Amino acid sequence: MCVNSCCAFVGVLENETKCKFCKENRYYSNSKARKNLPFISIIERLKLQFKNSERSKELLYRHNYTCNKEEFAHNNIGDIFDGQIYQELLNDKYFPDPRDIAFTASCDSYQIFR
């Protein structure tokens, strides 16, 4: 990873020795990377979270969430779980188990949904 977090040296950048954005060296003079980004898969992250009893209870938020009907009646959305897409997924029988996890994705300067 670039020392200034400009990019990760993967894919087309995996053989680069300088950041193409800020021009900083990727390695120290001893060939050791100046900055690393640890990778923990989503599966491993979820395992770690469910092993923690406190966090495991917090992960039930989606299952236990109830919308404020008064707010919803005025087209106010209090949570992502009030949204139309999530409600459609529920109607399609997604998320039947209390431990099911709903992921969302976001990216700066890009609108995923209308």
Image: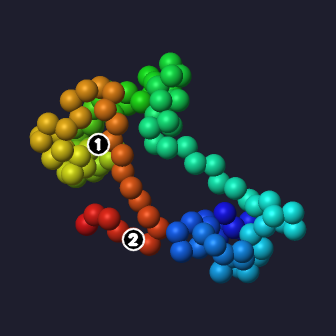
> Are circles 1 and 2 on residues that touch, CB within 8 Å?
no
Image quadrant holding the N terminus, namely: bottom right
- In depth, the one of 63 and 53 nearer the eye is 53
Q: Quadrant of residue 5?
A: bottom right
Disc assigned to residue 81? 1
Residue 84 coordinates in the image, percent (x, y): 20, 51
Q: Is residue 3 left or right of residue 83?
A: right
Q: Amino acid at mark 2?
A: Tyr
At x 18%, y 44%, the residue is 89
At x 72%, y 77%, the residue is 18
Q: Is residue 46 left or right of residue 67?
A: right
Q: Which residue is mark 2?
A: 110
Image quadrant holding the C terminus, namely: bottom left
| Nearer-N-terminus badge (1/2) | 1
Reply above or below: 44 against 18: above
At x 42%, y 30%, the residue is 59
Res 94 seen here: yes
Residue 10 coordinates in the image, percent (x, y): 57, 66
Secondary structure at numbered mark 1: helix
Q: Amino acid at mark 1?
A: Phe
Residue 108 coordinates in the image, percent (x, y): 47, 67
Rounded to the nearest angstrom, the CA distance separating label 1 from label 2 is 21 Å
Q: Quadrant of residue 2?
A: bottom right
Disc assigned to residue 48? none
Reply above or below: 57 against 32: above
Reply above or below: 7 against 65: below
Q: Is residue 4 left or right of residue 30?
A: left
Reply above or below: 38 against 26: above
Dot 2 surroundings within 10 Å: few (below 14), some, or many (20 or more)?
Answer: few
Q: Is residue 41 left or right of residue 19?
A: left
Res 65 seen here: no
